[in-house]
Amino acid sequence: MSDDLIGVVNAGSSSLKFALYEGERRLLAGQVDGIGVRPQARARDAGGEAIAPPALDPPPQTPAEVVPALIPWLRERLGSRRIAALGHRVVHGGTRYAKPVRATPEVVRDLEALVPLAPLHEPHNLAPIKAVLALDPDLPQVACFDTAFHRTMPEVAQAFALPRAMFEEGLRRYGFHGLSYEYIASVLPEVSPRLAEGRCIVAHLGNGASACALRAGVSIATTMGFTAVDGLPMGTRTGELDAGVVLHFIQQRGMDAAQIQDLLYRKSGMLGLSGGISSDFRDLLASDDPRAAFAIEVFCYRTARQIASLACALGGLDGIVFTAGVGENAAPVRARICQALGWLGLAFDATANAAHGPRLSAPGSAVEAWVIPTDEERMIARHTRALALG
Ligand code: ADP
């Protein structure tokens, strides 16, 4: 048991989250934010108490540069205990990786070929793996993919109406947030056996947002596509957008790829819709500016429409689950979405919603609604343990 500790790393473009698990018990967790600008580290122990985080000296310019400080910091805290393996979140596993995989140098090379499919995320996910391979090649590492859980989607749910050859070349709907959906699917049997066995839509509403249709806990359709800019509007991303708008940017406005990327990924969504007020739902809900209210209205309208579309893919609906930062905390957003889905047979309990559920539907409602906190890091720890320690 003493060798049984699993480290988890979730690296983004300017942040790196980390955690340490002993079985299902989280011993500590933390993150470094603002990397490249003003890096700040935080950490907390198993009881949630703040502890001294890794020292950032010199300040890391990239998330991978946190690794040389993080590994000794973890080891120092463990004394004689050993980290048995390190699990990483990797956004894209392409069509090849339908499951987590041991991150050997060969696999990392293979994954680097997927960088063009997720240029804003994949390099940041792979960099800490490479840093550990260089520093400590004997430490087993596991890559856990956000796309893997959706490899069960039928081809009809993956296809764009582009020439068939392009589908074979990989131009298809992959879907993301898979580790979150997989975690929710893993706890559904305890929350609602009916949803675990039936037709359930999970709305992962965070800074990034998507929804997934689960049939008996298996993904059969999702709103994100070839990239993580499709589907629902998000904090700063457009979500679904008429491709003709992109042509308009190029042909009429003379915008180049970098400008369009910046607009679609960083200046749109809630931030853009609200006229620049904020990408954060806390700010928008607190604002009395009508543009903030309008941004929230668009988000709820589009989310409800997408949920109804996923219900069609499922051939009906037994329940919905809200998760992630907005889904777990923003009661007014959940209320709007649930009310818009009343016609599907969802009887909404406003009092339960104000108390964050966990059950949001009234007794006897044909369609159930729940709030379930997600835990992607725990899912990575489970996969890493299973693969590295077998
Ligand atoms: P990420 O996609 O970065 O993992 P999270 O799932 O942590 O995002 O969600 C972050 C978002 O959740 C914030 O930007 C904010 O909009 C929203 N959020 C967090 N807490 C609250 C709250 N108490 N009320 C409303 N919205 C919240």
Image: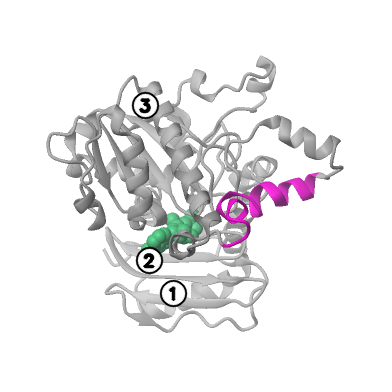
- How many angstroms separate mark 1 from mark 3 (CA)? 45 Å
Residue 135 locus on image (x, y percent): 59, 67
Badge 2 is on which residue?
20
- How many angstroms separate mark 1 from mark 2 (CA)? 8 Å
Asked whether residue 101 is in view, the answer is no
Which mark is first along the chain, 3 or 1?
1
Asked whether residue 192 is in view, the answer is yes
Which mark is first along the chain, 2 or 3?
2
Residue 167 locus on image (x, y percent): 63, 21
Residue 340 locus on image (x, y percent): 36, 36
Disc 1 residue crowd, few under 14, some 14–19, many 20+, Cα 10 Å = some
Instruction: Tell me whether circle 1 and circle 2 mark residues in contact (CB < 8 Å).
Output: yes
Disc 3 residue crowd, few under 14, some 14–19, many 20+, Cα 10 Å = many
Tag in front: 3 or 2: 3
Q: Is residue 80 magenta?
A: no
The amino acid marked with disc number 2 is: Leu
First to last magenta residue range: 257-277
Badge 3 is on which residue?
311
The amino acid marked with disc number 3 is: Ala
Q: Quadrant of residue 329?
A: bottom left
Which mark is first along the chain, 2 or 1?
2
Badge 1 is on which residue?
74
- Locate residue 322 relative to residue 158 in the image: left or right: left
Is 39 above or below relative to 64?
below
